[in-house]
Image (cartoon, grey):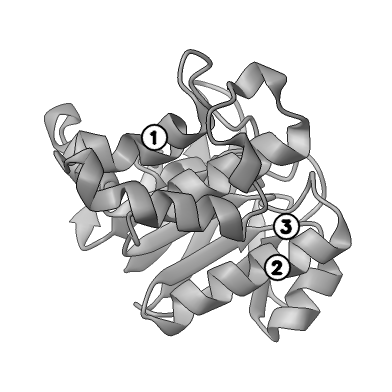
Amino acid sequence: MIDLESVALRYQSGPDILKDVNFQMRPGELRFLTGPSGAGKSTFLRLLFFALKPARGKARILKRDVASVKARELPLLRRKLGVVFQDFRLLDHLSVFENVALPLRAMGQAPETYERDVLDLLDWVGLKGRTADRPDTLSGGEKQRVAIARAVVTKPELILADEPTGNVDPALARRLLHLFLQLNKQGTTVFLATHDEALIAQANGKAIHLEGGHLRDL
């Protein structure tokens, strides 16, 4: 699922953000990524999302060598991924419902085949009454919940989440964690970057720590 061998990552000619990182993650695992602000957690996730290529070393994601993936292949590969970004990346001209349903529409599914699933998922994340609203009317926490719903609606093979509970209260954080755990129990591989140590403890999950460009197990 994820196999990094002596991977270094940098932006253009800048210093290495990741330094000779080795990391493996098997299908069906649940892992957490921790580290201080500025350590490169979001950059690490961008590598796993095929948005960056390693400066050296070998990175294989979903059985594909990241360095050799062509731009035309990315849309199909990314359909196997569910990604929760820190900046949400919602489309302001679409409603909450339409934002969550967007990956299903992109896959060619008809609205009548997914309407119930999208509504149930929005109910689960506490947005049952906001389906017709636009993102610019939502709080940061509400946008976060829409982004999570959109990421998991296709039940992808691999979920990558960057601080998925960073803008919600502890009670909702536990509920969202339960959603990730349920997906993991159904076979989805889940990789979450978070500062929330309580979240990791509740999930009884394995964690790795990124600092100074190096990874270590916790």
Residue topped by disc 2: 175
The C terminus is located in which quarter? bottom right
Which quadrant would the N terminus be assigned to in this image?
A: bottom left
Question: For this rendering, which residue is in front, 107 or 189?
Answer: 107
Q: Which residue position is annotated with label 3?
A: 194
Dot 2 lies on which element?
helix
**Considering only vertical position in the picture, is 54 above or below 32?**
above
Q: Is residue 57 left or right of residue 173?
A: left
Q: Is residue 44 at least partly visible in the picture? A: no
Q: Residues within 10 Å of mark 2 (few under 14, many from 20)?
A: some
Nearer to the camera, 54 or 194: 194
Q: What amino acid is found at the position of numbered circle 3 in the picture?
A: Thr
Which badge, 1 or 3, comes first in the chain's sequence? Answer: 1
Where residue 134 appears, x then y in whole percent?
58, 21
Residue assigned mark 1: 51
Image marks 1 and 3: residues in contact by CB distance under 8 Å:
no
Residue at horizontal 77 percent and vertical 30 percent from the top: 139
In the image, taking residue 129 as reference, residue 9 lies left or right, namely left
Q: Amino acid at mark 2?
A: Arg
Dot 3 or dot 2, earlier in sequence = 2
Q: Amino acid at mark 1?
A: Ala
Residue 68: x and y in percent read 18, 41
